[in-house]
Image: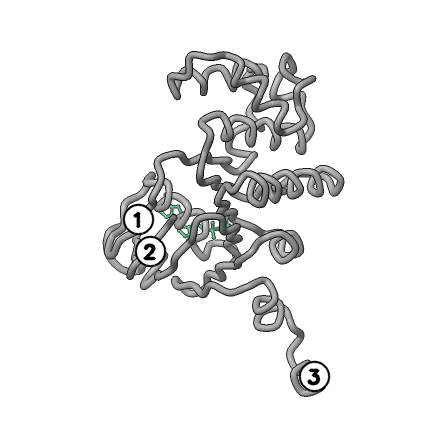
Amino acid sequence: MIQAENLAFSYTGSPPFVLDGIRFAVEDGDYVSILGDNGCGKSTLVKLILRFLRPTRGSIEVKTKRIGYVPQRSDAAASGFPITVHEMLDSYRRLLKLRDKSVIEESLNRVGLSGCSGALMGTLSGGQSQKALIARALMGDPELLILDEPSAGVDQDSQREIYGLIKALNAVRGITVVSVEHNLEAAVANSTLIYHLSGGSGHMCTPRQYVSEYLKPKGDEDHA
Ligand SMILES: Nc1ncnc2c1ncn2[C@@H]1O[C@H](COP(=O)(O)OP(=O)(O)OP(=O)(O)O)[C@@H](O)[C@H]1O
């Protein structure tokens, strides 16, 4: 689904590079969480996958054009712009040139938000507005769903619902998922793979490997 080869990126086009020598493959049906410290380049990598940015060197190929993107909630929903859930989804429907308006209610149903169609985005809880953004991303029937910190600003109960939803979209509907995460627990519990980004490059591993390589307290291996 996604193939990166010797990918390097600098916002200035010259050193220092935010990303350098990135090489990974995401296969159809994977659920990959991207983890790493603040400022290590997670969102930059996502913008390269989305083609919002172009590689400075190397390549990144994405096999599908049917990509659903759920941006960081604070970017999209926290503004005081007075728009209802229905209006937000309808403007996206028009952008996608979808004639049938029933896609709006279908998408809201899929995320369990059918009763909130007329609510102003700014009045929704963190969990509800995240679901509305996921509903919008589902309108184009994506093969690849990309999320940037889906649980940021979302209470514990809604987090469980949102990860349940993402997991079902992946496991039941076969949608490939790439999610930038600060929520380590959710990443380990839900994803099939973790891409650990550090010092400009990354390492793909299973959640189990991630726990033993990156989360195990120093010295534990002596007592294993
Ligand atoms: N538009 C930009 N122009 C110049 N530098 C940028 C730009 N966007 C991000 N950066 C820099 O690139 C580096 C990587 O940023 P990025 O947002 O990709 O990191 P991140 O891992 O997603 O961070 P966080 O976890 O805090 O969201 C940071 O040093 C950041 O300051």
User: What is the CA distance from the residue labelled 2 to the residue labelled 3?
Assistant: 36 Å
Amino acid under label 3? Ala
Question: Which kind of residue does numbered mark 1 sit on?
Answer: Glu
Nearer the N terminus, badge 2 or badge 3?
Answer: 2
Q: Quick check: 201 above or below 158? A: below
Nearest the camera: 113 or 16? Answer: 113
The picture places residue 192, in percent across and down from the top left corner, at 56, 56
- First of labels 3, 1 by sequence position: 1
182 relative position to 26: left or right: right
Label at residue 61:
1
Circles 2 and 3: CB atoms closer than 8 Å: no
Cα separation between marks 3 and 1: 41 Å
Task: Identify the residue shown where x is 46% and y is 61%.
Answer: 197
Q: Which corner quadrant holds the C terminus?
A: bottom right
Residue matched to label 3 = 224
Left-right relation of 61 to 113: left
Q: Is mark 1 within 8 Å of ligand 1?
A: no
Spatial CA distance of label 1 from label 2 is: 6 Å
User: Residue type at mark 2?
Assistant: Ala
Q: Residues within 10 Å of mark 3 (few under 14, many from 20)?
A: few
| Colour convention of the picture | one colour
Q: Element type at marker 2?
A: strand
**Label 2 within 8 A of ligand 1 by Cβ:** no
Name the residue beneath numbered marker 2: 4
Mark 3 touches mark 1? (CB < 8 Å): no
- In terms of depth relative to the viewer, which is nearer, 190 or 180? 190
**Residue 217 figure quarter:** bottom right
For the view shown, which residue lies furthest in the right direction? 157
**Residue in the image at 58% along x and 15% along y:** 84
CB contact under 8 Å: marks 1 and 2: yes
